[in-house]
């Protein structure tokens, strides 16, 4: 939920800053703010004596393709597309349109990754998509559509790809992942901004943009979201994001004097129904875990980590959470679950109508 509140502020605060900062420079600064903030958190923990390698698994060589993917889609393409689309869209409308990220994230997770999605969520996707179509319709525009609104939907698609690629990194140290993503993408966009003649803002405006980047685009937002991916999977994390636009609408009405057009008031209740359907979905069935050896942050009071500690493993901290290479024996059981890192199994219909 913390992720939803922070993401809700992304559109209105970015639109506010576009009055003082060029679009490419702003996109660069929000990414740099995200990455540098996460890096400072990591360095502060190290200075305080925290050995992150004992509580979080660092990214490895096999994670490089996923790191490149999240940097490209989430750190570069999405922010750049958004900053060019916001000037032509009212802030409250843009905030609602960003809910299409939940639709695209869930569709990719279901169709490409194979995560299970229930009937309520499919109904929710229909409601949210219908709401976005209402907001995108513009009789005076080409093909009857608003190009800036379509740009925001494209932004959502880029973030949806980023979310699903990010699930492959959700077992890794979120601070390192976000630092690499934000600093890498921000540096590239900043070089493009300078090459195209954009001027950098003063220290106050630049600091405000980096703070928005840390709070609303990455940094805290990405840390919370990667932890959610670890615990509940891309489809369910995307579902929880469905409530973020309503916080965005609230921020927009507080920051701007503009009132949304009539279509907004038609789309809002449809969007609300879709959001409620998404966050209320539940899932339970018999399932089997194959034997596996992997490394990620975990604790021993759940249903899946009852292994002992051998020589060389880190001691159990007082909080219980730690990271090391560990093995899981094959296990079959039934309990309510989400598609977290231990429940990314596929589902198929059986003759009796059950799921496996």
Image (tube, grey):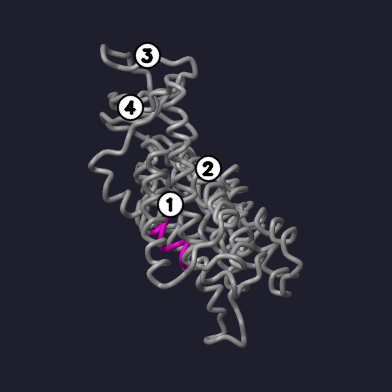
What kind of element bears circle 3? Answer: loop
Distance between the Cα atoms at labels 2 and 4?
Answer: 35 Å
Q: Which residue is mark 1?
A: 163
Q: Nearer the viewer, residue 2 or 43?
A: 43
* Magenta-colored span: 73-81
Q: Which residue is mark 4?
A: 331
Return the x and y of residue 150 as percentages of the image width and height: 52, 73
Mark 4 / mark 1, whichever is N-terminal: 1
Return the x and y of residue 123 as percentages of the image width and height: 56, 59
Mark 2 / mark 4, whichever is N-terminal: 2
Q: Tag 4: Cα neighbours inside 10 Å, few (<14), some, or many (≥20)? A: few
- Label disc, if present, on residue 315 of the rendered structure: 3
- Label disc, if present, on residue 220 of the rendered structure: 2
Picture residue at 38% right of the left edge, 43% below the top: 177
Q: Nearer the viewer, residue 347 or 352?
A: 347
The question of residue 77 being in magenta is answered with: yes
Q: Can the viewer see residue 356 in this picture? A: no
What kind of element bears circle 2? Answer: helix
Q: Tag 2: Cα neighbours inside 10 Å, few (<14), some, or many (≥20)? A: many
Mark 3 / mark 4, whichever is N-terminal: 3
Q: Nearer the viewer, residue 139 or 315?
A: 315
Mark nearest the camera among 1 and 2 is 2
Distance between the Cα atoms at labels 1 and 2?
Answer: 15 Å
The kind of secondary structure the magenta stretch mainly shows is helix
Instruction: Judge whether 313 appears above or below 340 on screen.
Output: above
């Amino acid at each position: 939920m913390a992720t939803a509140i922070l993401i809700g502020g992304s559109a209105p605060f970015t639109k506010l800053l576009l009055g003082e900062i060029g679009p490419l420079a702003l996109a660069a600064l929000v990414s740099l703010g995200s990455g540098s903030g996460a890096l400072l958190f990591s360095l502060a923990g190290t200075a305080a004596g925290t050995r992150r390698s004992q509580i979080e698994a660092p990214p490895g060589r096999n994670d490089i393709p996923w790191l490149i993917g999240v940097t490209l889609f989430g750190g570069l393409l999405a922010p750049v597309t958004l900053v060019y689309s916001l000037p032509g869209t009212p802030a409250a409308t843009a905030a609602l349109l960003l809910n299409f990220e939940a639709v695209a994230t869930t569709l990719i997770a279901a169709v490409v990754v194979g995560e299970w999605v229930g009937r309520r969520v499919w109904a929710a996707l229909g409601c949210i998509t219908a709401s976005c179509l209402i907001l995108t319709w513009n009789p005076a525009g080409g093909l009857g559509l608003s190009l800036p609104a379509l740009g925001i939907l494209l932004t959502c698609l880029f973030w949806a790809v980023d979310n699903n690629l990010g699930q492959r990194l959700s077992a890794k140290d979120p601070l390192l992942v976000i630092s690499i993503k934000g600093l890498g993408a921000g540096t590239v966009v900043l070089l493009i901004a300078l090459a195209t003649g954009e001027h950098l803002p003063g220290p106050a405006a630049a600091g405000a943009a980096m703070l928005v980047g840390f709070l609303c685009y990455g940094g805290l937002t990405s840390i919370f979201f990667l932890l959610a991916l670890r615990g509940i999977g891309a489809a369910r994390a995307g579902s929880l994001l469905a409530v973020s636009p309503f916080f965005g609408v609230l921020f927009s009405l507080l920051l701007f004097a503009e009132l949304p057009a009539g279509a907004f008031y038609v789309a809002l209740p449809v969007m609300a129904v879709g959001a409620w359907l998404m966050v209320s979905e539940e899932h339970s069935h018999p399932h089997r875990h194959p034997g596996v050896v992997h490394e990620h942050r975990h604790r021993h009071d759940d249903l899946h980590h009852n292994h002992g500690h051998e020589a060389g493993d880190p001691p159990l901290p007082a909080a219980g959470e730690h990271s090391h290479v560990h093995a899981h024996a094959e296990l079959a059981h039934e309990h309510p679950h989400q598609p977290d890192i231990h429940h990314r199994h596929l589902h198929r219909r059986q003759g009796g109508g059950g799921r496996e």
